[in-house]
Amino acid sequence: MAVGETDGAGSEENRNREDVIARGNILESFTESQEVRALLGNLRCVYGDSVAQEVIVEKFIVIMDKYQEQPHLLDRHLEWMMNMLLDVIRDSGSPPVLFHLAFKFLYIITKVRGYKLFLRLFPHEVTDLQPVLDMIADQNPKDCETWETRYMLLLWLSMICLIPFDLARFDGKVVSEEGHSRMPTMDRILEIAKCYLVVSDKARDAAAVLVSKFIVRPDVRQKRMADFLDWTLSMLSKSSFQSMEGTVVMNGMLQALAQLFKHGKREDCLPYAATVLECLDKCKLSESNQMVLRKLGMKLVQRLGLTFVKPKVAKWRYQRGCRSLAANLQAQGSVLQSQKITVAANEDEDDEEYDIPGEIENVVEQLLVGLKDKDTIVRWSAAKGIGRITGRLPKELADDVVGSLLDCFSFQETDNAWHGGCLALAELGRRGLLLPSRISDVVPVILKALTYDEKRGSCSVGSNVRDAACYLSWAFARAYDPSELIPFINQISSALVIAAVFDRDVNCRRAASAAFQENVGRQGTFPHGIDILTAADYFAVGNRVNCYLTISVYIAGFPEYTQPMIDHLVNMKINHWDSAIRELATKALHNLTPRAPEYMANVVLPRLLPLSVGIDLHTRHGAILACAEITHALCKLAEENNRSVTYYFDGKSLEGLKQIHQEVSAGCLFYYLSDCQMYFLTVCTLIEKLSLSKMPFKGDPVIGTFRDTKFTILPLFQESAVSALSALCNEYYINENGEADPALQDELVTQYISELQSTEQMIRCGFSLALGALPRFLLKGRLQQVLEGLRKVTLITPKDVSFAESRRDALIAIAEICQTVGIKGEGSQEEYICKDNVTQIYATLLNCVTDYTTDSRGDVGGWVREAAMTTTCSLFIMCWLAQQSAEKIDKFRAHAGSVFLTLLHFDSPPVPHVPHREELERIFPRSEAETLNWNAASEAFPRITQLLGLPAYQYYVLLGLSVSVGGLTETTLRYSAQSLFDYMKKIQNDSSAMEGFCETLLKVFEDNLRNDRVSVPLLTMLDQMLANGCFDIFTTQGNHPFPVKLLHLCKEEIKRSKDIRKLRSITAPTTVTQDLYFLVLFRFCGLIQFQGDMREKVLFQLLLLLCHPFPVIRKTTASQVYEMLITYSEVVDPAIIDEVMAILSESNW
């Protein structure tokens, strides 16, 4: 089942569906067989090259891993792959590297297909025994590079051990020709197994398999089984799980014993079982922190338990009989009479009475303890052991086991016990060991487990319990005849529907949906099963919001599920530890209210009102929201049916709703305690819903308490508080004539405007948004005062330069007010946006578009610019949008470009007076408005630089480009510079266009002198333009005004500049602030190419810089002048050029 949560929109759900399908079992055959054959054939060619060897191994792994989900597709090809690799292994001429490489490939195949099936394909002739033993003897157990070889050799040996001949026949002479005694084959194999049972690599697992095959041979069992068991028990006793070495040894011993008691005959193992159990008890594995040891101990315990009792099928077990899925569906909800329980008539009589050994009690006790283990894998092993052993016990003892299992479901037990208990009950049900007489005891457990959720700290535990409960429900659907579950159908079906729709975790919702589907198919008695499955299938329940707000409403349309779903939300979800679940639950109650309005009004709401003022914080939060949502839903329903809004409410309910706010306010005296913040936020929602519900509170003192609460001083409250204020004013502050009370209006507006100049930024933000939310009747007559107050908030002063959020929210408020009051050209400025106040609004927006404030958070002015650009959707400024569309920050460039194109192509009606509309529509066709990616510099700048040819936009686009071309972001710099240079090439031969461009460029420079945000990147851009020959047309003209003016501006930029920070930035060129001296120095050297008096002026400035008080300036100037003279040698008289160059290069500047 899926483990991720998907709470997105429908498109997210579709992507999940496609993802599941794409990763499903869609392979049909082993299509890479020829490629694999070629890889295996090339092993002899590549083994000597380590790089080629690694490549071929990785290719093989990639191919094999594709079949992890469908390994059966390899079955037809396993034999020839093994034979090709064994040919390499058996070749005596194969070097060790090739030998080990072949075994590595065998291991990769084994890993995918599983050793149990692959094992059978190993050759196991008599002639294979000695060579394999010799190969194993040649291996070094401590070589960490060749563990795959040892692992595969041990598996191969375990297969050869099955040859039906006495191993003594292979010994020949016990004494060799040299006179040394030779170890018998039986002892050699046993020593090999013992050696590898205590290693730390995977060969230990293969050694345990070897033991299980070897010790059970008749000849070995008679001679060596007792000694081997003594050795393993001795090793277990001497080892401790407190050390790493002891853990490794115990792991090997436990694996060997578990495999041996699994594959050995009962009569052979029974004499040793009690001794092994006693030794295992002394090890106290339950105290170990090693999960693997506890799991192996659990496996061994259950194998010992199966050894103690005779293998037989209990006659008392439940047998369902016919399990036809088609027959169940044809029954259409009726119980099939043909499917009767066939329990043996003499179920109380066993044909073979025998005593149950006393050790069984110990075994069952350990398994029951294992069900409470902290690791799932241990609990799962214990559950399977309970199922296996219970199937061999008499009915009375089996019933005792079930009773002990049910004790795991006490609320004094941990979630581990509940999970293990569910797994064990599912195992018993699957095996027919849970008789119908016990169903009445088990069903309540299932219902509790399906909603099990225990809070631990800031999260909860219990999702695994709910998942296991779904598995238990699934197992019951397959295990029992429909007639047995008829009394519990409504309870189980409702619980599964609730889990499928309202569970917090997606894996539990999907598990519940699968269990519901299984019950619909197998039982055929779930009410409206097919209809519900159609709406709540595997993919639909993946989206939590969709489950709560859409699917739940559909399912609640079936009366069998309506009340259980509402009760679950009220009892379990509105007090949930996760606030998101509480909020979703209350919205679901809102949607479910039309399904049972009387029940909501008469039962649910009276239950919620006391909880809304209770002491439990989570419950109070959820109850307040639920009261608000249910009240709103009931009032909407009454209004739709032409009834009074109080139709569903009695006096007690109305009074209770009014008292919630006062109770919560009295309990939360400190605004900044996190819990109190949450409840004030909740009360905002309550006020909004009560106002939208048009509750009869007009003139009631409670309205004053609603308004007096200072919600807007907390940033967390602002959005909810603004919505509440708007709803409150629209419902309770308007009289019959549609106007506001003058005294109330004056008090409210005056208070809000006065708070706009607060020294606290968040107070400014809150009251700005509050003014923007006021309805038209409250703004009437006070509009100009409100706009002036908001305009002052947008101004930057030394004391509030960092208040970017308040300036942003003031702009948002201005936009809201413009939409609220509307536009009327000849109207009053106190009632409408008109010709008398539109200039003020334009000026405010123009001022905010140039907000480039920065602080430790970065470009916080971007928030203000973005809000200003958004506002221009109503009050447009195309040129400033063009500037923003050319700047370096992707997010703001994209936002500006989107607004720019929206205004350009707006049709209802078309925006008038757009400069150069025809040229703009040619550059930005309507067909590309949606597809143009403004975030991509490669797409945006080639378009925006075309605006340089439009006089109205040239200044603003060039201002934006200077920041981008001279910036630090590589992608933005590359594409913006290339687009600018492409434009310059187009106008090189157009003198008038070049003159206009240069004049605009100098204007940008002059307007932004000593503004480092613009001037520094502008100088960098000029350096690139000079280096790319963008102004070559002027180099042949003596004393052209462009270089003269540029030189003057460069001198002004560094005039009296002694900012040490700029000089320090030399040592850290990646910092934002760059050295203006260096930038201007580069410009001076670039200007030397212009003819006339310019050269003399440039050289004079360079000589001044050679005398600068800062050494680093002098040194850099000398270096740049030296490089300049190499390029433009004609600047200096040839007679003295050598002397000048020597002074520049040899002096210690």
Image (cartoon, rainbow, N blue to C red):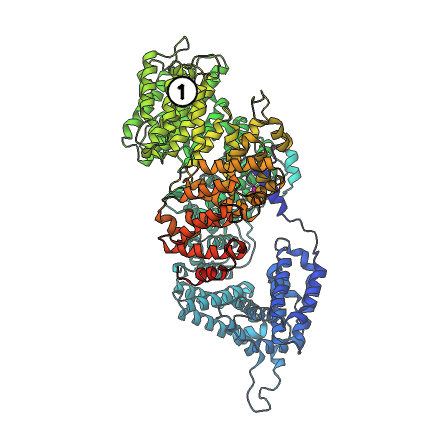
For the C terminus, the quadrant is bottom left
User: Residue 1149 in magenta?
Assistant: no
Indicate the position of residue 202 as horizontal and vertical percent values: 53, 66
For the N terminus, the quadrant is top right
Can the viewer see residue 915?
yes
Q: For mark 1, what is the residue?
A: 774
Q: Residue furthest top?
A: 737
The structure residue drawn at horizontal position 67% and vertical position 51%, both measured from the top left corner, is: 27
Indicate the position of residue 623 as horizontal and vertical percent values: 38, 29
Q: Residue furthest right?
A: 34
Return the residue nearer the eye: 832 or 4.
Answer: 832
Return the residue nearer the eye: 1050 or 140.
Answer: 1050
Can the viewer see residue 452?
no
Return the residue nearer the eye: 972 or 237.
Answer: 972
Number of residues whose C-alpha sits closer than 10 Å to that of mark 1, classed few (under 14), some (14–19) or many (20 or more): many
Q: Residue furthest front?
A: 1135
Q: Main secondary structure of the magenta part?
A: loop
Q: Is residue 1107 above or below residue 989?
A: below
Question: Element type at marker 1?
Answer: loop
Q: In the picture, residue 583 is in which quadrant?
A: top left
Q: Which residues are magenta?
A: 928-937
Q: In the picture, residue 945 is in which quadrant?
A: top right
Task: Give the side of residue 1001 with respect to residue 167, left or right.
Answer: left
**Residue type at mark 1?**
Leu
Indicate the position of residue 941 as horizontal and vertical percent values: 57, 40
Q: Is residue 931 above or below residue 197?
A: above
